Structure formats: C-alpha cells, structure tokens
Amino acid sequence: MKDKFKKENESLEPVSMYNIAAKLFAHLAKAVIDEFGEDGRKAILQGVSTFGEERGRDIARRAAAVGQSNNIENYLTNYDMGRSELFEYEDIYKENEIEQYFTKCVFADQWKKDGMEEYGILYCQEIDPAIARGFNPNLHVVHDKHFFKDGICHFCFQMKKEDNV
C-alpha cells in the first residue's frame, strides 16, 4: 500500500506556503465580495492596507533593532519576506528611489492558474504601498505594471522627503 501511494503521488508538485497564502487570500476575498459586493471589496482592500502597514512598521522595527533608520536604503535590506526561487526580480537603486522589476511571482502565477486574478489584483494594488507607508510615511510607491495586464510587475519606491520618521 505504501509503494502504491508513493507511485500515485510522484507527479505531485510540492506546494509552497506562498501558493497556499495566495489561494487563501483569493478564496477569502471572493467569499467576502460575493456576499457583500462593493462593501466587501472595500473591506478586503482595507484589510490588506492594515496588514501591510503593520508589516511596514515591523520592518522599521527590524531596521531600528540593528541601529538603522527607516530610510529608503534600509527598506529592502530589512524586509520581512525572504525571496525564494519562486520570484525573479531586479532591484535598481537610485537617489531616494528603488525600482523593482518582477518577471516571476508565485502569487500572480497561482492566481492566474486558479482564474482568481480579479481577487489577487486587490492584494497586488494595495500591499506594497501599505507596507511602504507603514515603514515610513514619506515612502511612496508607484506600481504601474502588473502581471495580469503587462506580464511583469514594476514598482518605483520614492522617498518624498529626506526626513526620517
């Protein structure tokens, strides 16, 4: 019986926590929006915003714990989510600005695979601006390209003032 189970499951791909989190978010967002319509959509966006701002404050605390300020140079180096091979990206540092290009994203891939792009985009649109805001209220994000529309994601993180909070 053990050998039969092993053979039947040899073709199964391992599932990462990223895939599971993407599926969970999409199903919760869909259920809330199906039940509450536009009010549900607004609630999902607010929840993502609150979650992101909390993460950003935690990233600022991580920086402070190692004696760093919450300026743009210390944002990604203290980021709370490791990047695995399930993401492909490039970071370009400029004065008071970081550009990121993602050519592979496990979240977007999962939402596309499941046909849940309309729910995944709610996370994508809100999460990075919220994290940046939580890290430093002067850190703003332009997210002008999305996987679902453009095939890549492009972010531009810009520090609007020199002041650190």
Image (spheres, helix red, strand yellow):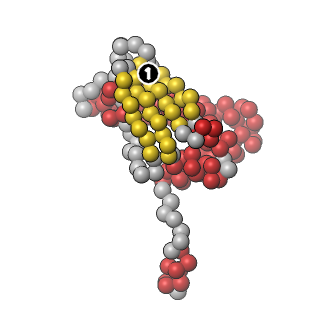
Q: How far across and how far down the image is residue 136, in percent?
A: 41, 22
Q: How far across and how far down the image is residue 83, in percent?
A: 40, 45
Task: Work out whether 15 lies above or below 35.
Answer: below
Q: Is residue 74 left or right of residue 114?
A: left
Residue 57 visible in the shown view: no
Residue 120, picture quadrant:
top right
Query: What residue do we see at 32% from left, 26% from top?
Result: 73
- Per the image, the residue denoted by label 1 is 158
Which secondary structure, mark 1?
Answer: strand
Q: How far across and how far down the image is residue 90, in percent?
A: 41, 38
Query: What residue do we see at 41% from left, 19% from top?
Result: 159
Binning the other alpha carbons within 10 Å of mark 1 as few (below 14), some (14 to 19) or many (20 upward) gives some
Query: What residue do we see at 68% from left, 41% from top?
Result: 118
Residue flagged by tag 1: what amino acid is it? Gln
Query: What residue do we see at 32% from left, 35% from top?
Result: 77
Task: Work out whether 73 lies above or below 40.
Answer: above
Q: How far across and how far down the image is residue 102, in percent?
A: 48, 40
Residue 70, picture quadrant:
top left
Residue 158 visible in the shown view: yes
